[in-house]
Image (cartoon, rainbow, N blue to C red):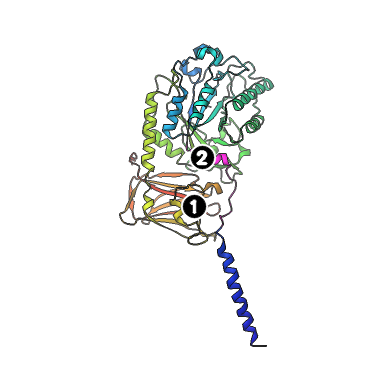
Amino acid sequence: MANRYPLIVIYFIIILSNIAPSQEHKFATTPPLPVSPLPSYSQLKWQQREIIFFHHFGVNTFTDSEWGTGKENQKIFNPKGLNTAQWIDVAVQTGVSLSILTAKHHDGFCLWPSKYTDHSVIGSPLQNGHGDVVKEFTKSASNRGVDVGLYLSPWDRHDYRYGKNIAYNEYYMGQLQELLNNYGNVKEIWFDGAKGSNAPNMSYHFNDWFAMVKELQSTINIFSDAGPGVRWVGNENGFAGTTSWSIINGSSLSIGNGSIVDYLSTGDPKGTDWIPAECDVSIRPGWFWHKSESPKKLSELLNIYYNSVGRNCVLLLNVPPNTTGLISTNDILRLKEFKSAIDKIFIKNLAESCSIKASSTRGGKDSGFGPEMVLDKDHLWTYWAPKDNGEKDCWIEITAIDEELKFNVVRIQEAVGLGQRIKKHEVYVDGKRVVKGTTVGYKKLHRLENGLVSGHHVRIRIIGSRGIPLISSVGLHFDPFWHPTK
Ligand code: FUL
């Protein structure tokens, strides 16, 4: 009896070594749990667009003003060479996949023949009152595979119902139905918070509007100061905060409340809602076209790009059609420069020819979560994940194989499909810190303040995170347009 005891133990060891390990190795390592809140499908699609166009067009284009009075004669709206296909061509050439049109601005003039008012294209010379700019615009966009969005200003300085709560909300919702039922898919609707003194007590039925919008267009993102799909960044300069969370506490937001602009620009890691920020800015000083104005310089546009797209936001760039009904040549030329500058900076990722290692890897080598995942072309669903063992100093390190690396831009992207996590990070070159930052999100671009750096080892350290950090992409780039002054 005494001799049989070790035999039983050996027998169990054999069974366990045959069954347990094979169970463990049979399946791929699973992805880590998400850290909520998470983006919706439409919000992720929106984020990946990076740059969106805005077109402010209406009676103001012809009166050289920014805010119309509502008393304009419809006959002044006369874009003799209107060609919305040209606007869309410019979007395509700039790599823009969504364009938003002001269907109605504060002056109340409608770019489509709304049946609830005569203050529209109906009274204008455009096709002798038979024109429909919204129709032409949405058709041109769909012909070229560009998505559309619409802006319907809540503030209306023309309509007699404005200020009568029920009547105006009925009018407004009637127009929402016209726009969202009759012009195909609409991917973004823009509700701005401006409200004038002509009816200070006017209350907008936002909840009903939002419900109606969702009912009519299931994949739309609703923009307003407070979302629910996309939030305002809190300024009209095109700059997000240096800390920029896509997360915020939706219940503490309200539309048209000037005191929350800082909160809007940074977001809130403790928030319960995924409402990322959109940075709206115009290529010119005004939102509408004015003969006396010209487009911003390339360096200004690049600054805006780094401070919006490079701070986890989408850039909503306004390009106003002129009185002919076309995008002006000098705007087109500037946009060409802008697009080719971005391509030039980001086409080459110096990290791609390097070796890469990490502090640890979830599931070990070849698990599909190794640091090499930050160098593939997928910037969302393939990523490096460290081990989930409370590691405080998580890092990935890129090492030059031969010549030293020379760069002035560091790009870091998080796998935001599983939540935004990184709170604090630093970048070291050969042991010396070259930049530090807070949030990363979908895309963080560091344009190095001291200009070009060179070295063999580039380490990205994550020193604060909600859950384990998940990095989907890293780039080391050279920006020839960047000339820091200090
Ligand atoms: C603001 C408006 O008052 C401006 O005219 C412009 O349309 C801008 C995008 O939104 O609220």
The residue located at (67%, 30%) in the rendering is 208
Dot 1 alpha-carbon crowd within 10 angstroms: few under 14, some 14 to 19, many 20 or more:
many
Judge from the rendering whether residue 376 lies leftward or rightward of residue 186; answer left or right: left
The residue located at (63%, 15%) in the rendering is 160
Q: Which amino acid does label 1 sit on?
A: Tyr
Judge from the rendering whether residue 480 lies leftward or rightward of residue 87; answer left or right: left
Instruction: Please report the bounds of the magenta region as a residue range.
Output: 30-51
- Residue 154, compared with residue 13, is above or below; it is above
Give the labeled residue for mark 1: 383
Disc 2 under 8 Å from ligand 1? The reply is no
Q: Is 46 part of what is drawn in magenta?
A: yes
Q: Residue 47 carries which label?
A: 2
Q: What residue type is labelled 2?
A: Gln
What is the x, y in percent for residue 212?
A: 65, 30
- Residue 21, compared with residue 371, is above or below; it is below
What is the x, y in percent for residue 317?
A: 46, 31
